[in-house]
Amino acid sequence: MKKLLLLLLCSFLYLNAQTIEVYGATATKATLEELKKEFLKDRKDDEIIYHIGSSGKGYAQYTNGMKYDMFFSADRKYAQSIYEDEKSKNEPKVYAYGLLTLYTLNESLLKSDLSSLMDKNVKKISIANPKLAPYGIAAMELIEKIPFANEIKEKLVLADNVAQATHFVDTGAAEIGLIPYSLLKNNTAISGKFILLNDTLYTPLEHCFIITKQGENKKLVQEFNDFVLSKKGKAIIEKYGFKTN
């Protein structure tokens, strides 16, 4: 009898286990992983499957039929586009603000006025592709404010996403890069040094997420939504170098 009850209980838990699919911008990878770990701590049978990449690439995949329950973008644009495309009842929610750094293996190049980008020893500058990544757009806004911007643009190496932009610096493919703080803070694997750049010099990087039509009736989606926006969720987000207000 006890074995039967145990079997019935296991079957009940299995049938009620939930799995959700979530797309996340590359700059939020470590943050999302810790949010998932803490959120699922008491939900052993549930699962969150992440798909990580540039916001633009994720949006393109979504519009071409790849469906997600939640979409975490590095700006408002792509989450807003999903909202408008679907005529969704769930508006995008800002959960974090991203910051840019100057990152290099050569510490002598770290100058807050960005004059190092014109240094004769800097042959290549790594940024994420502005057509795919909001951090690339922010990087271009910064560059446009610098004297000799056109000369600097000739040095640019465009990466598919911010992780690849960081990799270009780490491997010497670029002497310096404009990289998200969230990829560098608390990251013991990086080889270089960095400084935070003045965040008034570029349009605020409003990290937004949206619950899609596919996910709007899923209990686990709503619970994860609440956790991300909770005090505990915000503490995790701030730990990885984001602002939350």
Image (cartoon, rainbow, N blue to C red):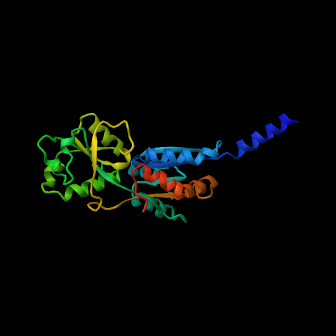
Name the residue at 62% across, 58% down. Answer: 217
Residue 101 in the image: state x and y as whole percent.
29, 50
Residue 146 in the image: state x and y as whole percent.
17, 57
Residue 11, quarter of picture: top right
From this viewpoint, is residue 205 visible?
yes
- Total residue callouts: 0
From this viewpoint, is residue 211 visible?
no
Left or right of 20: which side holds 196? left
Name the residue at 13% across, 50% down. Answer: 151
Left or right of 87: which side holds 156? left
As drawn, 72 above or below 1: below
Q: Residue furthest right?
A: 1
As drawn, 18 above or below 79: above
* Quadrant in the picture for the N terminus: top right
The foreground one among 65 and 96 is 96
Residue 213 in the image: state x and y as whole percent.
56, 58
Left or right of 32: which side holds 42? right
* Quadrant in the picture for the C terminus: bottom left
Residue 176 in the image: state x and y as whole percent.
23, 43
Name the residue at 72% across, 43% down. Answer: 13
